[in-house]
Image (cartoon, rainbow, N blue to C red):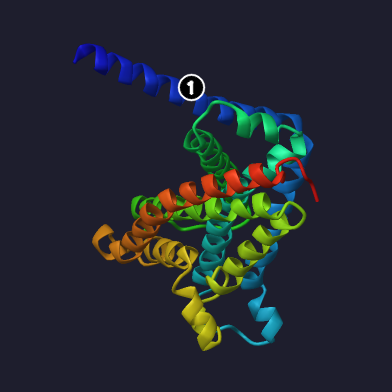
Amino acid sequence: MQQTLQKGVATLRLELLQSYAFMARNWHLTKRYWGWEVVWFVYSLTSGLSVVFIAQGAEELTGTPVNFDVQYFTMYLIIGTLVWRYLSNIFTLTSEVIAWERWEGTIEYTLMAPVARWIHLVGQTGYSLIYSLITTLIIGVAMALFFELDLSNANLFGAGMVVLGGSLSLVAIGIIASILPLLYPERGAQMTHVIQASFLLISGVYYPITVLPEWMQTLAIFSPVTYVLDGTRAAILDNAQLPELMQYILPLLVLGIIALPLGIQAFKMAENYAKRTGKLKRVG
């Protein structure tokens, strides 16, 4: 019994080290291309500010005094900007697990290595969560310097729980989307960006989904981003407490728990297919 336990602990330690190795590899790649990190940070900050300044300029745009709470509108747009930045980063970094390998010329070495695929994916998704959180927080602090934000009535803990549930869902969907570059080497990476753009359109990032056509509102119900945005805004803008936020958290957790193992299994099947058909090394 003791030997079995020791063997299990040793195996778990090895698997954790292997996952950490993928996280460390991605961190070194980020450092190597630090110039691009600066570019994307400036781009994300300026594009976010451009959207939020719409609230500040509403009065001049209409030419009449506005009859709504500008501060509320500003916070509405800031939440949408930051939450979308965080979730889209998770989706992008997870769905590009194959694209990264092709760019670096390491795809065959990685997928032929004696490492369980779930360990590889845990390392990739773990890095995407940490990277997305850090960069989003930095952008949030930078945006706070431009606007006076009142968070005295915000339930930040509840908002964090909603975002955490959404992270699991986006990781699962990202893994499923990462299959596309495996199956379609020439255009798979572009197809993942189409999925991401669709989430941006239907999920109410900068506007309530009620302004969308009815068929788009139906699609929005199936988008996890919708629940994350609605739940986060309810927690921060309306001080909704955890029991009230469960209507957003539970669907996210259910989706993530169901989709994550299915995504890993589907990735394995796509990987085996790519190996049999010689698509691993091909690039678009």
Camera-side residue of 262 and 172: 262
* Residue with the mark numbered 1: 17
Camera-side residue of 175 and 182: 182
Q: Residue furthest top?
A: 3
Q: Would you say residue 252 is visible in this rendering? A: yes
Q: Would you say residue 152 is visible in this rendering? A: no
Q: How many marks?
A: 1
Image coordinates of residue 201 in percent, x first then y, are 60, 72
Position of the N terminus by quadrant = top left
SS assignment at label 1: helix
Camera-side residue of 252 and 18: 18
Camera-side residue of 179 and 255: 179
Is 212 placed left or right of 235 in the picture? right
Report crowding for label 1: few under 14, some 14 to 19, many 20 or more residues within 10 A (C-alpha).
some
Displayed quadrant of residue 33: top right
Q: Residue furthest front?
A: 276
Image coordinates of residue 80 in percent, x first then y, are 54, 63
Is 249 placed left or right of 59 in the picture? left
